Image: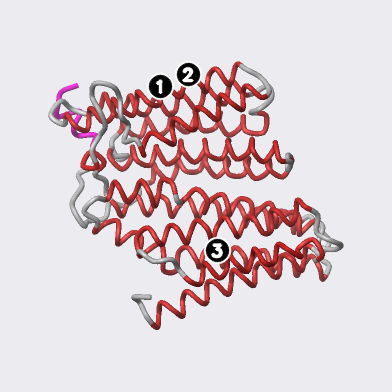
Amino acid sequence: MTDNAHGALFRRIVPHQHSRVTYAELFFDLVFVFAVTQISHTLLAHFTPLGALQVTLLFLAVWWVWVFTTWITNWLNPEKTPVRLLLFAMMLGGLVLSTSIPKAFDERGLWFAIAYAAMQVGKTIFLWLSTPPSRPRTRMNAVRIATWLSVSAVFWIAGGIAEGQPRLMLWAIALVIEYMSPAARFWIPRYGASSVADWMIEGGHMAERCGLFIILALGESIVVIGATFAELAWTTENVLAFVSAFLGSIAMWWIYFHIGAVAGSEQLSKSSEPGRLARLAYTYLHMPIVAGIIVAAVADELVLKHPGGHSDLKTVTSAIGGPLLFLFGTILFKFSFRGFLQLSHGAGIIALCVLAWFASELSPLMLSILTTAIMIAVAVWETVSLRSDPAE
């Protein structure tokens, strides 16, 4: 390829101008609808301390491969055929990854590791080869990223070959390496670390991509609610549980999208260092938001199937933990660009912690109704307070 052909694969970033999300990116995201479903079902089937730890590790891997791909497609142009082919290849890897999730700590561990490592290293090498010599800083940044991901890939493959606790430890090391890499600015010997200028992105596109992933996670919760309710006898308790779960999903959508998502996108687009803000707000702080939605979906299924009696530990943990993770993520996400902690979110976190003290004495239905009421109160409080005082 000529230098011009290489450079043609990059987006043309115009300051303060929003690049739309392409159909190829939306098509790619369909694989992660399946991945989110697999994660929630695996958590439901293995709701033990060890199972929760394993599912958390798998979730962190799924999120990381998706968000790294989002960074790549923020730099490269998915309207170009080579980049589209990259996304299609990533979809194949994503399907292998997703289908391996339920048995990733059993017989399909090596398949999960190979798919993950191939996706991470493969797309970064593609970025490296697609970067023309006329962009030496971008090219060097791709080399740094590929180096870190190649090191972590060794631990992924070794973990896939190992069994039991060694697999968990090796994969945990691999994730620590990858999650540390942006914070370390991909420092490598001799060449040092990248600069924030090397992470120039189109802010509106990044914000929209992460918002769409939130929609995917919320869509999974809607599917769980609908599919579970369709199989049940429509008693008064089940109908109330159905309504409560649905309203809880709406409250989560409202808290994230009504004000926060737009404000975050505008701030990212106007930022003089969009790469730094995107690394914090969209790469790291969106993890608890998505995790909270997934855990809440598990709670919805548990409550719908067993609305009566006392709430067991599994129901309490998911019903409280899901909204708690979600609010924890959103309060930090909004703090990253607003500069102040949202009082409504803090009050919601405190209310959920108080509810946790006597949650086991409540029926699953009542617990669901109360957690939903707290989330609705947070949404209304934020809407009213920011409407009356935008600077609050």
- Residue 181, disc: none
Spot occupied by residue 90 in the image (x, y as percentages of width and height):
44, 31
Left/right of residue 190 with respect to residue 169 in the rendered view: left
Q: Quadrant of residue 204?
A: bottom left
Marks 2 and 1 in Cβ contact (< 8 Å): yes
Quadrant where the C terminus sits is bottom left
Position of residue 201 relative to residue 346, above or below, is above
Spot occupied by residue 223 in the image (x, y as percentages of width and height):
64, 54
Whole-angstrom CA distance, mark 2 to mark 1, is 7 Å
Whole-angstrom CA distance, mark 3 to mark 1, is 37 Å
Seen from this angle, which residue lies furthest bottom? 388
**Which residue in the structure is indicated by mark 1?**
150
Question: Label 1 neighbourhood size at 10 Å, few (<14), some (14-19), many (20+)?
Answer: many
Question: Label 3 neighbourhood size at 10 Å, few (<14), some (14-19), many (20+)?
Answer: many
Position of residue 376 relative to residue 113, above or below, is below
Secondary element at tag 2: helix
**Which residue in the structure is indicated by mark 2?**
154
Secondary element at tag 3: helix
Q: In the rendered structure, which segment of residues is drawn in magenta?
A: 1-10
Q: Residue at x 58, y 22 (%)?
A: 111
- Residue 252, disc: 3
Marks 2 and 3 in Cβ contact (< 8 Å): no
Q: Residue at x 73, y 63 (%)?
A: 357
